Amino acid sequence: MRSLVLPPFLLGIAMLAACQKQELPPDEPVAVSVMEAHKQAGMRELTATGEIAARTQSELSFRLRGRLSERLVDVGSHVVKGQLIARVDPGELHEAVTSAEAGVVAAESHLRQTALTLNRQTKLFAQGNTPRRVHDQAETAFRLAQSSLEGAQTTLETSQEQLAQTELRASADGMITVVSVEVGEVVQPAQSAFVLAEDEGRDAVFNVSERSLLGFGLSEGTVVQVRLLAPPSLLTEGKVREIGPTVDPMTGTVRIRIGLENASPFMTLGAPVVARASIPVPGQIVVPWQALTADQDRQGLWIVDRGTKKVSLRPVSVARYLNDSIVLSSGVNEGETVVVKGAQLLHPNQLVAWGQQQ
């Protein structure tokens, strides 16, 4: 059997390759910054922009049909309770009141006459100078006169009430925010003519995205800080008074009303305000956002095995994002070592080295 003899130059190359294979340096550690994961308790904040609104808004309307003859207020007018704000043409109602007043006067005169007659017949009957039949007739006439007067008074009251309904008056102190009628227009009973924003009670109204509310735990009675947009130093506290039961399909927001018990006089209707609510949150692991990386469309963090000083990529779930960090809901256990800088240089089982951890 013939032995294979390599030419000298090939033999040299083979020996060189074998030496290089034996002398390959071990995997060099990558310098990274790390931190030990710890749960941190804190506060979660909800911020929204809205406006000051009246707690109570009343729709003012006439109770009878008529042509508007006078309107005494405009949008923005401040009124006091009982103030006349509009009237419709009374038509024949004045004459009806005058006629009813005359009917009351006549009924009162007739009652006085029958009362005198009954008094005289009662004395004569007691003396035996008049028969009972005449006395009873006088008493019956008196009772009828009383009924006639009561009927006349009822007619007068009805006529006066109808005449009063031609005038529309403010139901409370407040500001007119909507005017829906014009002079000369025929208004119908119960047709909204004005909207009155009452002075008593102020609310701050906000439209908050449903996503922001999820998991926040906002409920009626939650204390909220409210401040004017300008000047921002003017602030007060209020309590959530109402949370809308439905979500606006167009904006995806929920309407929230915050009752302001001590609203500043500068917090006028329509004034823009900012609300801020804070709630404590249970301990969760927080890491700098630079530590977050991607693993096949999933978010992950590099976790260091302190025994081997090698890394592995761990999928994580993010609860929420803060200005310079992220809050994790799962994926990392307390006490584990997380790479916070240098993640872009790593691959699974990469050897790492670090100095003082964060």
Image: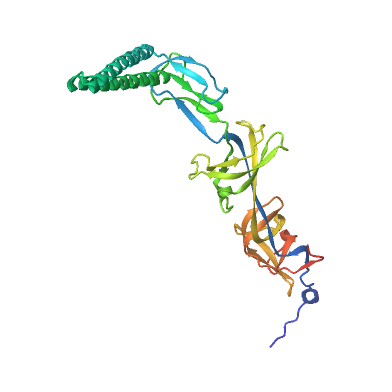
Q: On the rendered structure, is 83 left or right of 344? A: left
Of residues 171 and 284, the one nearer the viewer is: 171
Residue at left 42%, top 23%?
A: 62
Q: On the rendered structure, is 182 left or right of 272? A: left
Residue at left 49%, top 23%?
A: 169
Question: Which picture quadrant has residue 284?
Answer: bottom right
Q: In which quarter of the image is the C terminus?
A: bottom right
Above or below — where is 47 with respect to 170? below
**Residue at the limit of the structure toward the bottom, as seen here:** 1
Q: Quadrant of the N terminus?
A: bottom right
**Residue at the limit of the structure toward the right, as seen here:** 355
Q: On the rendered structure, is 69 left or right of 152? A: right
Question: Which picture quadrant has residue 115?
Answer: top left
Residue 140 in view, yes or no? no
Above or below — where is 335 with respect to 121? below
Of residues 137 and 289, the one nearer the viewer is: 137
Question: Which picture quadrant has residue 319?
Answer: bottom right
Above or below — where is 13 with respect to 107? below
Residue 212 in view, yes or no? yes
Residue 222 placement (x, y as % from top left): 60, 49
Residue 282 placement (x, y as % from top left): 64, 60
**Residue at the limit of the structure toward the front, as seen here:** 127
Residue 228 placement (x, y as % from top left): 67, 36
